[in-house]
Structures are given as structure tokens and as C-alpha cells.
Image (cartoon, grey):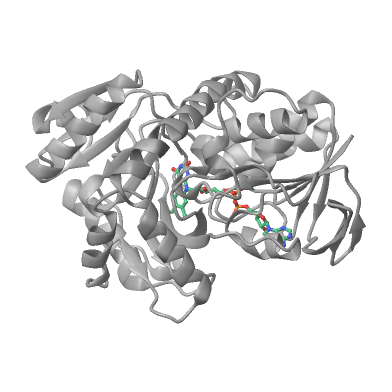
Amino acid sequence: MKVAIIGGGVIGLCCAYYLDKEGYEVTVIDRNNITDGCSFGNMGYISPSHFIPLASPGIIRQGLKWMLSSSSPFYIKPRLNLDLIRWGMTFRKNANEKKLQENIQPLNNLLQLSRYLMNDLKNEFHDSFDMIEKGCWALYKNPGTGDHEKKLAEQAAKFGLKTEICDAQQVQEYEPEVEVNVEGGVLWLDDCHLNAVKFMQTLHEYLQNAGVKFLLGTEVKNFEKRNGSVTSIISNKGEVKADEIIIANGSWMPAVARMAGIDLLMQPGKGYSVVYEDLEKNLHHPSILVEDRTAMTPIDRWLRIGGTMELSGHNSTILPKRVLAIYTAVKRYFPTLEIPVPQPEQAWYGYRPVTPDGLPYIGRHSKFSNLIFAGGHAMLGVSAAAATGKLINEIIGRQPTSIDIFAFRPERFS
Ligand SMILES: Cc1cc2nc3c(=O)[nH]c(=O)nc-3n(C[C@H](O)[C@H](O)[C@H](O)COP(=O)(O)OP(=O)(O)OC[C@H]3O[C@@H](n4cnc5c(N)ncnc54)[C@H](O)[C@@H]3O)c2cc1C
């Protein structure tokens, strides 16, 4: 059976990995060449700790406060855009306690399954993507934030997640090379991190060698449909036929869904990152600077810092103040860390595919017998990629899925 995957990001490649292993004839179609994009410049966290979906109580109030500052970690470009308005209204409907309680469990299941599967990938690929299993810090400067983080750690214990709660001195002992200026931190021991570029390169190379066909520089433009199934994919380079079609094109998913007459709510959430090489002194653990929503990923002498969530559509504008804010946050927590101020042109940016409830779309669409969605993981695409690939393989094989996927159905906002 032939399977075509639209999108060669981390989700598309992980789908290809599991489908190829199962023996399907797999084709990955991407309009670029799989060397850059959201799956390359991210922080590389595998985060079972992130079981609270983005749409949660209090997030809108916090977001509105952030909107008042040009250097805050969140920004919505004011504009009259119907898709954004519909997305925002649906997000608001989902940011409540009842929905949160419904959505925590499925997200936790997805993240924990993925974390487990990442061990297999690490072994299979002989750790070619620098997966480091040391945990991840949630560092805070305010006692109030600390209380919130500790409560989260208690909640996490119910899911079997392990944490270590540290005061400032204990954090400093864990980070002997750099001065740490925090109130305390929670070390999430099940989290791990990897080099996102190497992860993508490893998967791409493996899949090419395994015989997966890559149609690069190939943009999907339309579908031919007949009797409730998609009979071919129309691209700028011609037609592609497949028995099953997976739409895994990240934040551009609504555009391709529309070609099939399907309305899907999603917004691109732009984020920035900056890389520093050859640092003499570096962190020993990846760190989320909670109040500033900034993340740091150290791998040996290499460091990536990143953050911000801009809902400004797909546009290539880099806002210098927000790049600078990432750097400033890092220096507030690690005042002696020797890294130069990043210039805007040094910043990488990518678009997180953000759904209005913080859960991805994983599953078939009832409008067609052979169309499947895999995407919308927002800030958790790498964390959930392996599980998503495995689930998609099970969906295509019409097998029982490893976890319940009802919460991820692509039609939940229709
Ligand atoms: C600053 C930042 C930090 C992040 N940190 C983390 C992290 O630490 N951990 C984590 O889990 N996640 C993180 N994320 C989120 C993660 O990067 C994304 O969730 C993930 O990369 C999305 O992968 P994807 O495969 O769905 O989409 P993408 O990587 O965007 O891939 C989609 C692909 O589809 C292709 N495409 C689009 N339209 C078409 C078309 N019409 N025809 C053909 N091809 C098409 C594109 O060219 C692209 O290659 C971060 C994101 C950002 C921005």
C-alpha cells in the first residue's frame, strides 16, 4: 500500500519512520528541502513535564498583560483576520478548568508514550542526535511562581513523573560553571533534550537509505477527490497517487486542509532562537526560565536560547526587541554567562502549529476514507513526534491505537 505524507518536518518524518518499518511504500512531499524550518531550530526538548495544554485558565489574562509590553514573550499582531478571530474565540472557550481537566490526561498519555519511544530511537540510531537524559529545569525568581511550579510537580507525581525541588543553593550546585540568580527550581527528571538538527538529519538519512521516496521542492496545490476519497495529490511538479494521505505540514495545515474542503483552526506561533558555540562556561542542564517563558538548551560547549510566541501570521519580520528580550531574560537568571547580545539577523525563527486547545490533530477525517491529519503540536512537536508517528501507523493499519486518540480528532471544533 502506498502512503504519501505531505510535510517533511519532525512529524512527517516520524510518521514515515513507523510506516516504513511496517512495510508501506512511503513518499514524503515537501516544498522545501528538509534542511530548515520549525523542526530544526527548536529547543530540542522531549518534555513529558508539559502535560498542561496551552489553553488553560489564567492564560488569557496573562496574555493580555504581556500584550502591553513590546518585549514580553507573547504578541498578537492586531489585524482583522477572520481565521485568527475564530481561532481566538475557540481558544477562549477551551481555556477553562473543565476543558483543562479533560485534556490533561490525553496529552500526558501522548507525551509519555513518546518519551518511552525516544529511548528506542536513541538506541537504534546509536545516539547520533545527542539525546541527553539529565532532566530539565523550571527555574523561577518569584516565590509565587515557585509555589505554582511545586503544585505542578505534585500533580505530575500522580502521572508517575519524577521531580526534584531545589532551592537556589541546590540549583547552583547542579550548575557549577555559571552563577545562578534564582529563587529556586524544579528539576523534571523524566525530561530530556537532543540536538534538533541532528535528529532531523538522522531521520532523513535513515529514511532515504530505507527507500522512502522524497519529493522535495514539491508544493501540494490541490487534491483530486472522488466518491469520498482523495484520488490524487496535485503538486507544482505533477500528480502523486497514494492509497492513504497524511497531512503533516505543520502550521500551514489549514491551507492544505482547505484544498480538501476541510476547515481547520490553527495559527502559526512564531518563536525565535539563537545559537552560541564554543562557550568556555555553560549550563549543565536545559533550563526553562519560567517567568520569562525563555528556554536554554546546552549540549557540551554549545548553547541555544529561545522563546517568544508571536501570533502574527506567516511573515519573515524579526522583531529585534523580542529577540533581545530572550537574551535579557537569560542574563537575569545567569548574570555571568558570557554570551554576546544577539543581532536580529542572527536569530532563527520558526512557526509552531498552534491549535485552539493545545492538543494536536491526529486521526482520520470523516469526509474522506483515506485522509489523515498529523500536526498542530504547538511547542511539543519534537516531544510528541515519535508517539504521533506510531499512532499514525496504527491508524493506517486500522489497528487499536496505543493510547486513546479521541481527544485529538481533527473534527473536534467543527
Ligand atoms: C522557538 C521554538 C522552540 C521550540 N522548542 C521545542 C522543544 O523544545 N520541544 C518540542 O517538542 N517542540 C518545540 N518547538 C515546537 C516544534 O518545533 C514544532 O512543534 C514542530 O517542529 C512542528 O513540526 P511539524 O512537522 O508539524 O511542522 P514543520 O516542522 O513546520 O514541518 C512542516 C513541513 O511542511 C512543509 N509544507 C508546508 N506546506 C506545504 C505544502 N503545501 N506542500 C508541501 N510541503 C509543505 C514545510 O515546508 C515544512 O517542511 C519549538 C518551536 C519553536 C518555534
Using the image, determine if residue 357 lies above or below residue 67: above
Task: Please state the horizontal and vertical placement of residue 40, each as a whole percent of the image.
Answer: 56, 49
The C terminus - image quarter: bottom right
* Residue toward you, 386 or 365: 365
Residue 343 position, x and y percent, is 38, 68
Residue reaching furthest to the bottom: 80
**Picture layout, residue 11 above or below residue 293:** above
Q: In this view, does 322 lie to the left or right of 249?
A: left
Give whichever of 8, 153 is nearer the camera: 153
Q: Is residue 291 above or below residue 319?
A: above
Q: How many labels does the image show?
A: 0
- In the rendered image, which quarter contains the N terminus? top right
Q: Where is residue 238 in the image (x, y as percent from the top left)?
A: 91, 62
* Lateral position of residue 167 relative to residue 399, left or right: left
Give residue 143's quadrant in the image.
top left
Q: Is residue 226 visible?
A: yes
Query: What residue lies at 80% left-to-right and 38% top-to-bottom?
Result: 208
**In this rendering, would 336 be left or right of 271?**
left
- Residue 295 or residue 4, whichever sits in front: 4
Residue occupying image coordinates x 42% and y 47%: 277
In the image, residue 132 lies at what x, y percent? 44, 27
In which quarter of the view is residue 70 placed?
Answer: bottom left
- Which residue is drawn at the image coordinates 75% and 28% (left, top)? 398
